[in-house]
């Protein structure tokens, strides 16, 4: 009986190891965004994966907003005048291999601009380099896994 229990526990631990490794290889989860201009934390974004493999990201919390319950008054699409908390800012992102993601867009709510976006996991999945470009003008940030 003791041997069966030991084997069962050992199997469960070994089965969990690949799951932990794959979590570090995926952008799915919560990320603290860091403002590239001030270096201060700005929000918490939760990235999820749909059944078709595309990724989306929603702002789940604003950190120190300039006013309570801000809306995206500068947005020009379906997000115009919607609350920023809960807003989908990453759309249509897809894995492109090796911890890299592309093909999607990212919204910068304080500007109301939508950028073509790329993301790359760095430092073993602890950080996410996020860039967005309109034509040849690009901006980037490093987000921290929560």
Image (tube, rainbow, N blue to C red):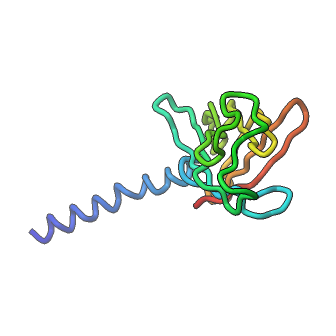
Q: Quadrant of the image for the N terminus? A: bottom left
Q: Nearer the viewer, residue 135 or 113?
A: 113
Quarter-of-image position of residue 34:
bottom right
* Quadrant where the image shows the C terminus: bottom right
Q: Is residue 10 left or right of residue 86?
A: left
Q: State the residue in front, 45 or 145.
A: 45
Q: Position of residue 108 (x, y in %)?
A: 76, 42
Give the residue at the far right of this rendering: 136
In percent of the image, x 51 and y 38: which residue is there? Answer: 49
Judge left or right: residue 121 versus residue 131: left
Please identify the residue farthest to the bottom as the structure is shown: 2
- 21, above or below 113, in the image: below
Image quarter for residue 107? top right
Say which residue appears at 66% left-offset and 28% top-offset: 78
In this rendering, is residue 43 above or below 92?
A: below
Q: Position of residue 131 (x, y in %)?
A: 77, 43
Q: Position of residue 116 (x, y in %)?
A: 76, 33
């Amino acid at each position: 009986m003791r041997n069966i229990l030991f084997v069962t526990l050992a199997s469960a631990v070994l089965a969990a190891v690949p799951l932990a490794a794959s979590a570090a290889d995926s952008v799915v989860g919560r990320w603290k965004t860091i403002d590239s201009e001030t270096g201060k934390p700005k929000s918490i974004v939760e990235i999820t994966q749909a059944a078709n493999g595309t990724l989306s990201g929603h702002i789940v919390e604003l950190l120190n907003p300039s006013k309570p319950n801000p809306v995206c008054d500068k947005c020009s699409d379906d997000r115009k005048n919607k609350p920023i908390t809960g807003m989908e800012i990453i759309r249509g992102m897809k894995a492109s291999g090796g911890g890299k993601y592309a093909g999607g867009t990212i919204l910068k709510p304080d500007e109301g601009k939508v950028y073509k976006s790329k993301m790359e996991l760095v430092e073993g999945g602890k950080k996410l380099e996020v860039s967005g470009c309109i034509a040849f003008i690009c901006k980037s940030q490093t987000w921290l896994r929560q």
